[in-house]
Image: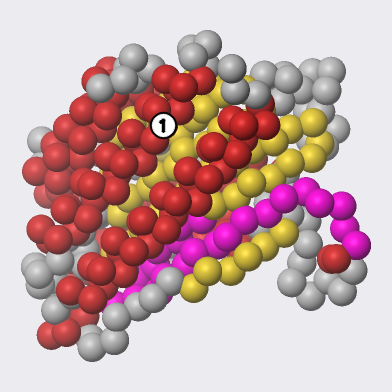
Amino acid sequence: MATDSEHKKQTSAWFSDLQTQICARLEALEEDADPALYGSKPGRFTRTPWRRGAADSDEGADERADEGGGIAGLLRGRLFEKAGVHVSTVYGEFSDAFRGQIPGTEKDPRFWAAGISLIIHPRNPHIPAVHMNTRFIVTTAHWFGGGADLTPLLPRDRHQNAPDSMAFHRAMKAACDAHPSGDYEAFKAWCDRYFYLPHRDEPRGTGGIFYDRLNTGDFAADFAFTRAVGEAFLDIYPKIVAGRMSTPWSADEREAQLVQRGRYVEFNLLYDRGTTFGLKTGGNVATILSSMPPVVKWP
């Protein structure tokens, strides 16, 4: 029977490997982009290591207690105006203000967490933005969480029967259906509830799946499902991009994209639990806020 230490090694290694695969796939799409639409210089990811709680300019960082860290992957390219693909493995103790809000920390504030998180903002308004994350968290309890959701930016694409949304949901459903830990209908409904802007009375996008605190009692099954979510994303999103990237766009469509991106900002700053978790656990601020679109408008 695997120990908690082995589970931590397995999950952390997987998230790192998935980051490598996703970055390579996005860079390949950057290479394939039409210079007439996007310019001639493909973007490349920069990968920046960071340590939890250590500022870049902190001369005493080497003396800090080891609390983990991660690799921030950031691409500012011609096809992908901004893409952040980040991995982290962090540990330590929750602050007094945060302990008790997370299962298993009521009497013991120690935690360990590893995961991958990404957000992609394409330049072309016809290509939807996308978010994906999966994570494994250990306190005196342990569980998986994550999901993936699609955010089309143009009004005609922002419905469940649009081709891109249907393809994305088929991929997520297949990942769920292939594993006993997956429950597509429940996770889809959870995603729709979670990625919603109550002050606007509208969804952020066209959904996908979202799950949290997943522990069926079978680590291997839960981990296999979490890997399947990442693999499904790795397969479907590049296909969506490839099918849209040759479509030209107008100034009005670019304007509509930038306005809709404002909704993304509003959700992430007002409601997103991942943003709150990262900031309250001493995460890398630049990485956490890299989900913000590079250009945005509020009319």
Relative to 195, 102 lies left or right: right
Q: Which residues are magenta?
A: 63-86
Q: Is residue 291 magenta?
A: no
In the rendered image, the vertical position of residue 15 relative to residue 296, given as above or below: above
Residue 197 locus on image (x, y percent): 41, 37
- Considering every residue shown, the one lying at the far bottom of the view is 40
Q: Is residue 64 magenta?
A: yes
Question: What SS does tag 1 mark?
Answer: helix
Q: Residues within 10 Å of mark 1 (few under 14, many from 20)?
A: many
Residue displayed at 23% across by 88% down: 40
Residue displayed at 54% across by 52% down: 87
Residue displayed at 39% across by 67% down: 82
Most common secondary structure along the magenta stretch? strand
Which image quadrant for residue 200? top left
Which residue carries the number 1 mark? Answer: 226
Residue 13 locus on image (x, y percent): 53, 45
Residue 148, visible in the rendered structure: no
Q: Which quarter of the figure is the N terminus placed in? A: top right
